[in-house]
Amino acid sequence: MNKVKVVLYTQDTVYAEYFSNFMRNPSNSSKFSTKIFTDEAAFKNNIRNQKQHILLTDANLEESDKSNFDKVIIITEDKSNAAEHDLYVFKYQPLNELLSQVLSIYYESNGRIEKSFYQENKETVVSFYSGSAGTGKTILSLSLAKNLTMQNKRVFYISLEQLHTTYLFFKEPKVSSAEVFYYLKNNTDRLISKIEALKSHDALTNIDYFTFPVLPEEMEMLTASDVKTLVSALKAMQEYDYIIIDLDASLHERNTAAMEISDEVFWILSSSETSMARTKYILDNDLIGNDIDKTKLHYILNKVPSNLFSNFDSYNFSIEASIPFFSSWMEMDEQQKVLGDTEIGEKLAQLFITNQELFRQVDFVEN
């Protein structure tokens, strides 16, 4: 289910705590992803580069502070204001009624989301992307996939990297899945029926995947339409709980298409200034396109050393998970890293698995 992302910014700490407790109710946390701020600096730092659906506030904000929200709704202590203005709600009404009004306001101008909000989708599509190479994206994506299979989830892993390294992680001899390209390009009517025969299964991790021994030129020929068709075919099989897509660092249309159709996008940053600067440039110039919902981007900082570069804080990314640098991995091959992981996969899963109460839906930021 697609959650509505709500941010409350108020300096009324009593109301913030009251709102926070109410939103932690399971019936609300299944519908809303909520962040609450009572400090102006924390609010401004955390909303940068983070597109959100709704801002609830009683503060007088600058237009630049509102730009990352689809809708800004004022909470007021004056009932007459709430009655006279379309974007005002009365602050001290029962919160279930307040949220009902908020959703009514939001859906009036964003009706396209309403259907998906109430429709449960069986498959969750998660893409892993990075604005620069060498961030450890593939290991993180497979660590998440393995963690999910350990929870008895059915997972399909797809590498859409131009130079993929799947063979380093799944070393047992497997049948080639290259024929998928033929059906994807020339015979989509038979694609779904052929996936079962063309996919591979890794017995050590219980992950299903494609082995693509293709040339880089062939991967470059994969269009946005091809990616959407492939994912649609996997979903139509109704066999998988999660489809995880491993993308490379390019801005090729296959990558932007994958992010567009994903439910969540894990954007991997390394602790280098180059990685931060490239990501900031991509986002500031909207190089990933307007069709990607920025609210589903999760920024993950990987390979974190004991000390970060001096102006790290100036980039203002809302980092949702930090993965430390493991010196012991220097002596392991790629398969051993994934098989031995007990931390990374669980930490990433905590960002979006709600049915096991692993995703902390409400962030209360105090002064």
Image: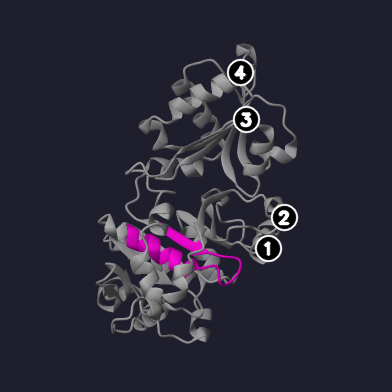
358 magenta-colored: no
Residue at figure coordinates x 49%, y 67% from the top left: 137
Q: Quadrant of residue 241?
A: bottom left
The residue shown at (63%, 12%) is 80
Q: Which residues are magenta?
A: 125-147
Do the CB atoms of the residues marked 4 and 2 lie less than 8 Å apart? no
Check the image and report above or below for 150 versus 96: below
Residue that label 2 marks: 311
Query: Residue at (42%, 31%) from the top-left corner?
Result: 24
Residue type at tag 4? Ala
The answer to whether the residues at label 2 and label 1 have Cβ atoms under 8 Å apart is yes
Spatial distance from mark 1 to mark 4, Cα to Cα?
Answer: 46 Å
Q: Label 3, on which residue?
A: 367
CA distance for labels 3 and 2: 23 Å
Residue under circle 4?
82
Residue 68 seen: no
**Quadrant in the picture for the N terminus:** top left
Residue 42, position as x, y percentages in the image: 64, 38
Badge 2 element: loop
At label 1, counting other C-alpha atoms closer than 10 Å, the crowd grade (few under 14, some 14-19, many 20 or more) is some
Q: Earlier in the sequence, mark 4 or mark 2?
A: 4
Residue at left offset 39%, top offset 66%: 142
Callout 4 crowding tier (Cα within 10 Å): few <14, some 14–19, many ≥20: some
Crowding at label 3, few (<14), some or many (≥20) Cα neighbours within 10 Å? few
Q: How far apart are the two marked residues, 3 and 1, measured between alpha carbons?
A: 29 Å
